[in-house]
Amino acid sequence: MHDNDEHPLAEYDDRLTSLINSMADGVIALDKSLKITLYNGAALNALDVNNLMDRKHIGDVLQPIDKNNQPVDVEALIRSIKIPTTNRDLRLKYADGSAINLYLNVTPVHETYSRGGGVNGYVLQLRDITHEKSLEEERDEFISVVSHELRTPIAIAEGNVGNAQYILEKTANLAQVKKALDATHKQILFLSDMINDLATLSRAERGKLQVEVEPINVHDLLVELASNYVDQARAKGLEIKTDLDPHLELLQSSKLYVREILQNFITNSIKYTQSGSITIGGQAAQGGVLFKVSDTGIGISKSDQEKVFDKFFRSEDFRTRATNGTGLGLYVTMKLARLLHAEISLNSELNKGTTFTIAIPDLATQPKPQQQPGA
């Protein structure tokens, strides 16, 4: 009789253990004294523990920190919970110095089916949400940066249009109207560039960028680019120069993306150069073309050079902060460069200028890259 009574319970325990071990999330069951009574392999992985945790106090194996890197008394936290509660603001540090963002759900187990009964234990659910938190932070930063950068040009453009209307009605001074409209046009161009960056970024992040290989007359492309930016450079008292290898030949690559990469370098140079010149160059290189865009601008510090291609990066240099920008241009440039199998290098010195160099291979000699998710 005794054996028959125990058999269903043993079978139930086996099923429960199998069910918990099949879960991707870490699961830990605690008794009322907060000793571990049950756990699965995912919990061992989340806590980076290889040995058994039976009958250990949860505070001995789970030692989270908060967003300010301060230790959290997890046992006090658990005891304070009366209803199922989720916390997404904890972190775990491992022995090797790495850390994860931790999802922790705590569910009290009551002695009776009534919520009024005493707590008989707790069930913890753990999950590594580092990637999710990173995406959330990136989304929040994206919204913050874009909303801020959109607000300024829209306000300036709106003010200038209103000013032009007022001048036209009151004085009909066409010179002043033209000045106001020119200022508005500059802000609209800035918005257009931003939207183009955002559209390209969106396609790149979703792996939707495709390379359409075509022959590019490099000499003509660089001359055209220099001509396109002469007026913008002159408006700041800058000179646009070219340094062209007479032996340049046709380059098989994406004309659209090569142009966008070089445009990003050129506009970046004009933006951060107060006096002097910007030089656009190209020379034949083994297997492709070596492009250079050099300026005599404010330069980039050693510490910033390591981060300049990061998404949303803006230098703390006050001269950089004085200009508009989303911090997306060079990030998008790097995405496009990888798509073209190109290599970018940077040489810069504060107050002396910057040179961006990109070696773009001839794709006729390589397998045609159709699409690269997350390029």
Image (cartoon, grey):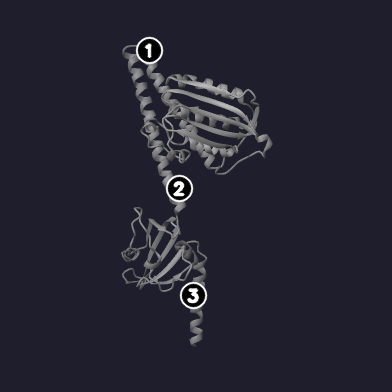
The residue indicated by pointer 1 is 175
Earlier residue among tags 3 and 1: 3
In the displayed structure, 238 sits above or below 329; it is: above
**Viewer-side residue, 30 vs 101:** 101
- Kindly report the distance in space between the C-alpha atoms of the residues bearing marks 3 and 1: 87 Å
Name the amino acid type tagged 2. Answer: Leu
**Secondary structure type for disc 2:** helix
In the picture shown, does residue 214 fall above or below 122?
above
Whole-percent x, y for residue 266 in the image: 50, 27
**Residue 335 found in image quarter:** top right
Viewer can see residue 266: no
Residue 173 location (% of width, % of height): 35, 11
Q: Which residue is mark 3?
A: 13
Disc 1 crowd, CA 10 A, few/some/many (<14, 14-19, 20+): few
Q: Amino acid at mark 1?
A: Ala
For label 2, the residue is: 135
Q: Give the x, y percent position of residue 10.
A: 50, 78
Residue 151 quadrant: top left
Compare residues 196 and 312 and report the one nearer the observer: 312
- Dot 2 crowding, Cα within 10 Å, few <14, some 14–19, many 20+: few
**Sequence-first tag of 3 and 2:** 3
Secondary structure under the numbered disc 1 in the rendered image: helix
